[in-house]
Amino acid sequence: MDVTEIPTAIVTGATTARGIGRAIAVRLAENGHPVALLGRNPAAAHDYATKIADKYGVPALGLHCDVTDPASVDEAVRETSARLGPIGVLVNNAGTTDPSRFLDIGGATWGSVVDVSVVGTFNMMRRALPDMLSRNSGRIVNITSVSAQNGGGVFGGAHYAAAKSSVAGLTRAVSREFAHAGVTVNAVAPGLIDTDIRGEVDPALIAEVVSGIPVGRMGTAEEVAAAVAFLCGSEAGYITGATIDINGGLYLR
Ligand code: NDP
């Protein structure tokens, strides 16, 4: 990466107040990246982008984008590139979960969980890569999950584990193909992070899960964002096809 220039970054799924995507956008802005926050709630994305621009003094945009829809992805990337400059950093964070047991997962539920992570990550990488290839430099970070390693659990079912495992494979495959072109592609696999993705979950159930985490607490969105920002930076140029686990030692037991 050319360290004299801090490239434009896109973060998908950056429309929830306590979410990992918003924290990543904040951290990248803090590091000087012009940043676009994407999601299906453009009002929230715009609001967060305005606050980021005011606080960190970088250009920031909040745009509508449904990552499962190639036309919507095309429009969001085109607008970001036109207004903030060519894309040099892409963080595929958009995701959704569902606690259904295996035999209760119908086709629509399967699609709703798998499409956002797998098709969404595929669509975004395909659309953003040409900008990176034209600069001979780029950083892609895909958000997977500890569920890809331990098979999921109470908060995400088999469809969620399958989706995140697919993103892990996609990450490694694309990292091989574009390493020669200066583009690194890595994954970050969070464990239990304190956001609103799980909806209204019984606090007793959360406490039970936390009791199995060696560090003894949930992680924070900011802790995930710090690792993502490192992988997006100029010092991470020799890291590709890797996964950073941020799970408080969850699978050590
Ligand atoms: P949130 O529910 O807070 O955020 C999810 C984001 O994804 C929202 O901004 C939502 O925005 C966006 N999104 C959902 N569907 C689409 C779509 N079709 N197109 C574009 N954006 C979409 O969850 P978290 O911040 O907790 O999760 C962020 C990522 O981290 C997810 O990939 C999740 O799987 C992963 N993760 C989270 C863990 C946790 O414990 N919190 C653990 C492991 C992984 P909108 O509805 O506006 O489109």
Image: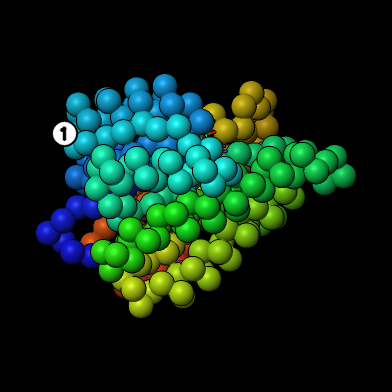
**What residue is drawn where x is 12% and y is 59%?**
4
In the image, taking residue 120 as reference, residue 82 lies left or right, namely left
**What residue is drawn where x is 26% and y is 58%?**
233
Rendered location of residue 196, percent (x, y): 54, 29
In the image, taking residue 175 as reference, residue 100 lies left or right, namely right
Packing grade of label 1 (10 A; few <14, some 14-19, many >=20) is some
At mark 1, the secondary structure is: loop
Question: Can residue 236 be seen by looking at this rendering?
Answer: no
Q: What amino acid type is highlighted by mark number 1?
A: Gly
Write down the quadrant of residue 207 in the picture: top right
Question: Can residue 95 be seen by looking at this rendering?
Answer: yes
Q: Residue furthest right?
A: 103
Q: Nearer the viewer, residue 166 or 181?
A: 181
Q: Nearer the viewer, residue 55 or 78?
A: 78
What colour scheme does the image use? rainbow
Rendered location of residue 192, percent (x, y): 55, 42
Q: The C terminus appears in which quarter of the rendering?
A: bottom right
Q: Residue furthest bottom?
A: 180
Q: The N terminus appears in which quarter of the rendering?
A: bottom left
Q: How many marks?
A: 1
Rendered location of residue 118, percent (x, y): 60, 53
In the image, taking residue 204 as reference, residue 12 lies left or right, namely left
Query: Would the CB of label 1 be found within 8 Å of ligand 1?
Result: no
Rendered location of residue 14, percent (x, y): 43, 35
**What residue is drawn where x is 22% and y is 30%?**
53
Residue 4 drawn above or below residue 98? below
Q: Nearer the viewer, residue 114 or 181?
A: 181
**What residue is drawn where x is 53% and y is 38%?**
66
Write down the quadrant of residue 5 in the picture: bottom left
Residue labelled with disc 1: 57
